[in-house]
Every structure is written in structure tokens, then in C-alpha cells.
Image (cartoon, rainbow, N blue to C red):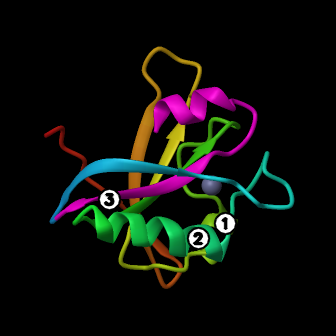
Amino acid sequence: MIEHARREPRLECCGLLAGRGYQITHAYPAENVAANPATSYEVSTKEIVNLTRQIRENGLELLGIYHSHPNENEEPSETDISAVGYPDLAYFIISHISDEHPQVRAFSIRDGQTSELNLHAP
Ligand SMILES: [Zn+2]
């Protein structure tokens, strides 16, 4: 996830996260098809369908969506909040990408409300 963000430090990179229960074990990078990928992200429906199928075939569940913020903002933007399509997923935001230790924070976004989730290393 962090490697993906570092490959394109000026664009928002995005992808899906999968695992079992509350434990995320796999990241599936996706293409950002947003009109302005420097300030927003969008995964095509086709890619979501393809990746969701791969996740199921690997015996995993879709648990989260990640994207990076090249502008260093650690929290979900207004667009992120209004564009949420999967309120049951955890929304991960990677920021401070070029730092030695990038910030990774996760949020639950539901009905326009965000709340930060606690992350634990396995
Ligand atoms: Zn965002």
C-alpha cells in the first residue's frame, strides 16, 4: 500500500484491502480513473468487480479501501466523505508518503459521519 503510494507520489493512488474477520492481509492496487487524480480518486466499477472476484477466489473478504493523499492531509476530504459507496468498509488514508514513516489512518465513514478506527499490527 505504501509502496504503491510512493510509486506515484503526486497522484492519489487507490486500491482494495482484503482479509478475514478484522485482519487485513492483502492489498489489491487499483487504477485511479478520477478526472483529476491529483486531488481525488475513483475506481472503475469494472475493476471493483474484477478485484472483488479475485478476493473471493482467494477465500478472502473485502474489508477496506485505501487511497493516498499527496497533499499530506491525514483525514478524509469532503469528497471522500460524500463519495462513500461502501459504508461497511474501512477507509484507509496514506499521507506523508515521502517521510520515512508515512501516516496510515483508517476511518469508518457512514451517513456523512467519520470516526477513526484503531489499527493494530498483527
Ligand atoms: Zn481522499
Asked if residue 62 can be seen in this view, the reply is: no
Q: Pointer 1: what residue?
A: 78
Res 81 label: 2
- Work out which quarter of the rendered image holds the C terminus and state it: top left
Viewer-proximal residue, 15 or 102?
Answer: 15
Q: Which residue is labeled 3 in the image? A: 18
Residue at 86% in and 61% down = 35
Q: Confirm if mark 1 falls within 8 A of ligand 1.
A: no
Q: Which amino acid lies under the numbered mark 2 shown in the image of this protein?
A: Ile
Q: In front here: 113 or 22? A: 22
* CB-based contact (under 8 Å), mark 2 and mark 1: yes
Distance from Cα at disc 2 to Cα at disc 3: 21 Å
Judged left or right of residue 39, residue 101 is: left
Quick one: SS at disc 2?
A: helix
On the image, the x and y values in percent for residue 84 come to 56, 75
* Mark 2 vs mark 3: in front: 3
Any magenta on residue 17? yes
The magenta region covers 1-20
Residue 41 percent location from the top left of the image = 69, 58
